[in-house]
Image (cartoon, grey):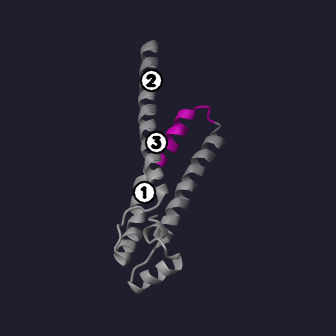
Amino acid sequence: MRNPLAAVPGTTLGQIRADMARANESLSADCVLTWGAIGILQAVVVLLVAIVRQTSQVGPVVATDLALLVFAAPGHLVVAFEPGMSIADTFMVSGGDHAPWGVALYLVSAAALVALIVLIIRSARGAAARTVKTG
């Protein structure tokens, strides 16, 4: 979420919420917390499915986890948009991400995208090589 304490330094969260309420704005952190919980739940489901299936193939599990990380940044943008705009409207600051971990999330998401692309290319090349050998 757009960190309200970083966006409005020198204030407390209580002061920020009170000022936002007076401006008829809402921090609406529930959506962001739900988004985070859903992401964790998805990762746990991937792990449990891999354990239950006792899969020896790591590639599909890694690819699924990488896909979750790839979609983390766009999901964050969507769920944090409303609180960010509310902070911006109330305090006349940028609606952008003021938290240092926001940049980290975008970098991890981008790295996961690159890794997923590499994994897909390697998998396709491996499948093509196996087809040539058996063909």
Please name the residue shown 60% across and 51% down the image: 44
Q: Earlier in the sequence, mark 3 or mark 2?
A: 3
Disc assigned to residue 112: 3
Which residue matches tag 2? 127
Q: Position of residue 130 (x, y in %)?
A: 46, 18
Question: Which residue is labeled 1 in the image?
Answer: 75
Mark on residue 53? Answer: none
CA separation in Å, label 3 and label 1: 14 Å
Disc with the residue nearer the chain's start (3 vs 1): 1
Specify whether 6 is left or right of 94. right
Magenta span: 55-70
Q: Earlier in the sequence, mark 1 or mark 2?
A: 1
Whether label 1 touches label 2, CB < 8 Å: no
Instruction: Give the secondary structure at mark 1.
Output: helix
In the picture, measured across the screen, residue 51 lies left or right of residue 126, that is right
In this rendering, the answer to whether 110 lies above or below 7 is above
Work out how far the residue at label 1 is from the one at label 2, CA to CA, in angstroms: 32 Å
